[in-house]
């Protein structure tokens, strides 16, 4: 298996797992917060998709491309701004993020498809491309590993924890 195929499979597993973990939850379960400062499942699902969209489109070419969130004006459908990604959201902003599940999964599916297709076009040397000439260790591959894959599994773990707090097992 080559690097691109491995990454495609890892990222696809994360995106697929978010959907599988949430497809049987009620809106109330999706919005459950054990404390007023905690994130809810809908927020975590959306936030990971937004970060994946932003990161992928910033590293997919040397010049980057516009994220789907902006290009297709998903921010208007969610009632948010172009810049919103969830990072730095206040507890009230987290609470206020409650999009329809179908809207959320439609956005996630588009992001997932774009990443799958884009990674499929990468050559081995693309992963070693530095993103910052002053920091050659910050490469495309490192961003995929830490921000897309690592970040995704981190938030997927939070989703599973929040399900457990509600007496719901995580999907197998």
Image (tube, helix red, strand yellow):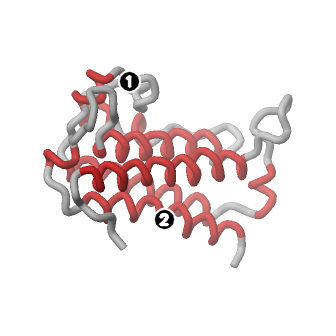
Counting from the top left corner in percent of width and height, residue 27 is at 14, 47
Is residue 105 at least partly visible in the picture?
no
The residue lying toward the viewer, choosing from 68 and 159, is: 159
Residue depicted at 21% across the width and 37% down the height: 98
Counting from the top left corner in percent of width and height, residue 2 is at 71, 74
The residue lying toward the viewer, choosing from 30 and 148, is: 30
Q: From the viewer's perspective, is 131 left or right of 45?
A: right
The residue lying toward the viewer, choosing from 6 and 126, is: 6
Is residue 82 at least partly visible in the picture?
yes
Counting from the top left corner in percent of width and height, residue 66 is at 51, 37
Q: From the viewer's perspective, is 78 left or right of 47?
A: left
Residue depicted at 24% across the width and 29% down the height: 95
Label 1 packing within 10 angstroms: few (<14), some (14-19), many (20+): few
Of the 4 image quadrants, the one containing the N terminus is bottom right
Which tag is nearer the camera, tag 2 or tag 1?
1
Q: Mark 1 points at which residue?
A: 89
The answer to whether 5 is drawn above or below residue 113 in the figure is below
The residue lying toward the viewer, choosing from 79 and 92, is: 92
The answer to whether 100 is drawn above or below residue 117 in the figure is above
Question: Circle 2 — which element?
Answer: helix
Disc ID at residue 12 = 2
- Quadrant in which residue 126 is drawn: bottom right
Q: From the viewer's perspective, is 35 left or right of 144?
A: left
Residue depicted at 48% across the width and 44% down the height: 53
Q: How far apart are marks 2 and 1 (CA)?
A: 27 Å
Of the 4 image quadrants, the one containing the C terminus is bottom left
- Quadrant in which residue 109 is drawn: bottom left
Label 2 packing within 10 angstroms: few (<14), some (14-19), many (20+): some
Disc ID at residue 145 = none
- Mark 2 vs mark 1: which is more N-terminal? 2
Question: Circle 1 — which element?
Answer: loop
């Amino acid at each position: 298996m080559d690097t691109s195929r491995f990454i495609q499979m890892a990222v696809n597993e994360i995106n697929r797992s978010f959907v599988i973990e949430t497809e049987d939850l009620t809106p109330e379960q999706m919005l459950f917060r054990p404390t007023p400062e905690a994130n809810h499942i809908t927020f975590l699902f959306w936030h990971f998709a937004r970060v994946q969209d932003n990161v992928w489109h910033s590293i997919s070419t040397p010049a980057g491309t516009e994220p789907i969130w902006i290009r297709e004006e998903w921010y208007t459908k969610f009632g948010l701004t172009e810049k919103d990604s969830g990072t730095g959201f206040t507890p009230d902003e987290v609470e206020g993020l409650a999009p329809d599940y179908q809207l959320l999964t439609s956005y996630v599916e588009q992001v997932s498809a774009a990443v799958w297709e884009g990674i499929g076009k990468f050559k081995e040397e693309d992963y070693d491309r530095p993103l910052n000439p002053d920091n050659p260790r910050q490469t495309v591959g490192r961003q995929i590993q830490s921000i897309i894959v690592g970040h995704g599994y981190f938030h997927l773990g939070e989703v599973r924890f929040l399900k457990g707090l509600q007496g719901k097992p995580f999907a197998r």
